Amino acid sequence: MIQPVLADLWPQYGLTVATPRLELRLPREEELAALAHLAGKGVHRADERPFLTPWTDGSPEDRARFVLQEHWSRLAEWSVAAWRLGLGVFRQGEPLGVVTLRARDFLVVREVTTSAWLGIEHQGKGYGTEARIGLLTLAFDHLDARAARTEVFQDNHASQGVSRKLGYEHDGISVDARDGEALVSDRLRLTREKWAQAERLAARVDGFPACRPMFGL
């Protein structure tokens, strides 16, 4: 009897993006637990707040459960009209964080948005840039996106630097409420033309053809 494979029903489980040091893919259950535990230990210092998500609120267990809920909700709510692909970032099997590619009405607007977090112990080593390159390779070279967007707090210098280095350009601002305070983020946009001109590491995408129907392609 042929055993069923999860990727036969949900082909994103067969999707892998490889860069020189990293592998991006959907985590299996034990890997998801490891990623959740990693987030529980912290994704930034307690005296910082570089994300809208309140990563320092609650207990480590609360933060870990948030990662689980986010992952499961992304899978459960997937549709061609609105999807979020949250890929685990691994180095030699060790979980480092999560990068997310999301879009709404992609078949019409052809734009994606990226976001990411890394465990605090894995920051400052270039993994964030490398993982972003892998995600953008999927977006531009396989999904045929016209542009990629991200939103970054103006004082989040590390994320700002990654985006600028890859060719993102200023595209306005957004204002969000957090704890009764209005916070301004820079909207940054990377066009297909700028991506083609950027100096970047090589990245390989495997398993995408089977995923095309899930994106409406």
Image: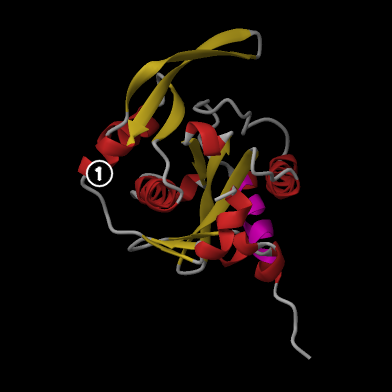
Question: Is residue 38 shown to the viewer in this render?
Answer: no
Left or right, 133 with respect to 41, comes to left
Looking at the image, which residue is at 64% across and 37% down?
Answer: 82
Say if the magenta span includes residue 84. Answer: no
Spot occupied by residue 138 in the image (x, y as percentages of width and height): 43, 52
Q: Main secondary structure of the magenta part?
A: helix
Spot occupied by residue 166 in the image (x, y as percentages of width and height): 29, 38
Q: Nearer the viewer, residue 148 or 42?
A: 148
Question: Is residue 26 shown to the viewer in this render?
Answer: yes
Here the colouring is: secondary structure
Which residue lies under the disc numbered 1? 196
Q: Is residue 49 above or below residue 101?
A: above
Spot occupied by residue 144 in the image (x, y as percentages of width and height): 42, 46
Left or right, 67 with respect to 171, comes to right
Residue farthest along the right direction in this orientation: 1
Spot occupied by residue 90 in the image (x, y as percentages of width and height): 49, 61
Looking at the image, which residue is at 44% across and 50% down?
Answer: 122
The quarter of the rendered structure image containing the N terminus is bottom right
Q: Nearer the viewer, residue 10 or 65?
A: 10
| Neighbourhood count class around disc 1 (C-alpha, 10 Å): few under 14, some 14–19, many 20 upward | few
**In the image, what residue type sits under mark 1?**
Ala
Q: Nearer the viewer, residue 125 or 18?
A: 18
Numbered disc 1: secondary structure: helix
Left or right, 107 with respect to 200, comes to right
Q: How many marks?
A: 1
Say if the magenta span includes residue 38. Answer: yes
Query: What is the span of residues highlighted in magenta in the rendered image?
Result: 30-39
Q: Is residue 96 above or below residue 158?
A: below
Q: Is residue 102 above or below residue 75?
A: above
